[in-house]
Amino acid sequence: MLSSKFIKPSASEALAGRKTALSIPENHFVTGNVIAPPFPAHIHEAMFGLGCFWGAERKFWQQTGVFSTAVGYSGGYTPNATYDELCTGLTGHNEVVKVFFDPERISYPQLLALFWESHNPTQGMQQGNDKGTQYRSGIYTFNDGQKNQAQDSKAHYQAKISLSGFAEITTEIEEATIFYYAENHHQQYLAKNPQGYCGLGGLNIAF
């Protein structure tokens, strides 16, 4: 029988959380730009879950055209969850990275390609040795255009990886729900701790 950490809880099973948001820094540790609204009018947003959010965030802030990034919790129920609560498996949330980008310099399809190539999207409720619902693969969309492009990219990458014998993609593609910022020390963690843990590993198959 699977551990409860491999099964997303229902809303009635989720932890209660709190009304007060966690404290976060105003500016990105690497880019120096803001990580919370308001943003310049030309900046768009995207949101992805691909395992431990430390390494996931670094993948995106390194891209030309990305204005800033932030890590947090989304896709579940518990308002303003803490990391310790997330690790119980009782919030329903995923570890996600929110990407704020200039579409004139980097497109949403380019972000999708990076997403697919940066992790193993066939593992269900885990990523490598990181196991639990918080490590599931997910694309969380903000409009119909993103949804359609995400679904098309999933079909495209499935065809590519199937040729190499990999299993079915388990990535969830859902409308983005409330994003709760993670604690200050998790923001841009690998810039602050260059030798810190990163469990990301792709399939070595180009998008």
Image: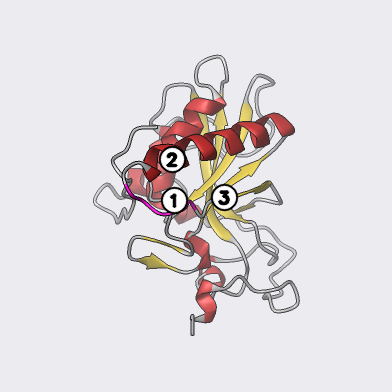
Q: Position of residue 171 (x, y in %)?
A: 53, 51
- The residue at which mark 1 appears reads as 121
Q: Quadrant of the C terminus?
A: top left
Q: Which residues are magenta?
A: 165-169
Q: Amino acid at mark 3?
A: Ile
User: Pointer 2: what residue?
Assistant: 116
Which numbered marker is on residue 143? none
Q: Residue 191: x, y in percent?
A: 34, 43
Q: State the separation of the CA atoms marked 2 and 3.
A: 28 Å
The question of residue 168 being in magenta is answered with yes
User: Which element type, helix, strand or loop, lies under badge 1?
Assistant: loop
Q: Is residue 131 magenta?
A: no
Whether residue 77 is visible to the viewer of this picture, yes or no, is: yes
Name the residue: 41% across, 54% down: 167
Task: Please identify the residue farthest to the top as the structure is shown.
Answer: 104
| In the rendered image, the vertical position of residue 129 relative to residue 70, given as above or below | below
Q: Which residue is identified by label 3? A: 24
Name which quarter of the figure residue 17 lies in: bottom right
- The reply to whether discs 2 and 3 touch (Cβ–Cβ < 8 Å) is no
Residue at the spot x=53%, y=27% of the render?
A: 109
